Image: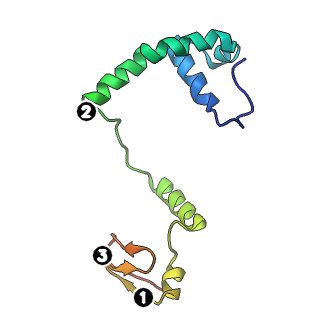
Amino acid sequence: MIGGSGKTGIDWGRIVARLATALRRLPSEILDMEFAEVEPLFEYWSQYPPEHESAAIIAISKGWRPAQREATPEEISLETARGYATGKYLRPEHLLAMGIKTIKPGDPVPGVGPLPWPEMQVKK
């Protein structure tokens, strides 16, 4: 059967999704397939991709790009919280510890470089 523990580095979800889309089958049907049934499909598709992949290749080669939507305030807040938690973003207290009280666009921050955002006051 298709699938596994996920410890091999193989993205089984992507493989199941590709097969389900190309064969127009439910993921549960794909999971019941044996690898011997799938291998010839991948060999064939290496030269003749499924129609949805061929259409995407043509569209991208003609300049099409997926629509980009603006992040919601909730998504921005979540990303900011993740950035602070992982150290990706500096917290105001980090800037104060470096002796920085006012930041203007283009000002270098030690170890970070110039900042692109508008002037801000760092408050205790």
Q: Residue at x 65, y 37 (%)?
A: 9
Q: Could you classify mark 2 by the number of other residues whose Cα lies within 10 Å: few (under 14), some (14-19), or many (20 or more)? A: few
CA gap, disc 1 and disc 2: 45 Å
Q: Left or right: where does residue 21 sit relative to residue 112?
A: right
Q: Left or right: where does residue 77 sit relative to residue 38?
A: left
Q: Residue at x 60, y 23 (%)?
A: 16
Q: Secondary structure at mark 2?
A: loop
CA gap, disc 3 and disc 2: 33 Å
According to the picture, the residue beneath numbered tag 2 turns out to be 63
Q: Secondary structure at mark 3?
A: loop
The answer to whether residue 124 is visible is no
Q: Could you classify mark 3 by the number of other residues whose Cα lies within 10 Å: few (under 14), some (14-19), or many (20 or more)? A: few
Q: Tell me which corner region of the image, top left, top right, bottom left or bottom right, holds residue 40.
A: top right
Q: Residue at x 61, y 29 (%)?
A: 13
Placement of 114 over or under 73, stated as above or below: below
Q: Earlier in the sequence, mark 3 or mark 2?
A: 2
CA gap, disc 1 and disc 3: 15 Å
The answer to whether residue 27 is visible is yes
In this picture the colour scheme is rainbow
Q: Are marks 1 and 3 in contact (CB under 8 Å)?
A: no
Q: Amino acid at mark 1?
A: Lys
Q: Which mark is residue 106?
A: 3
Q: Earlier in the sequence, mark 1 or mark 2?
A: 2
Q: Could you classify mark 1 by the number of other residues whose Cα lies within 10 Å: few (under 14), some (14-19), or many (20 or more)? A: some
Q: Amino acid at mark 3?
A: Gly
According to the picture, the residue beneath numbered tag 1 turns out to be 101
Q: Tell me which corner region of the image, top left, top right, bottom left or bottom right, holds residue 37.
A: top right
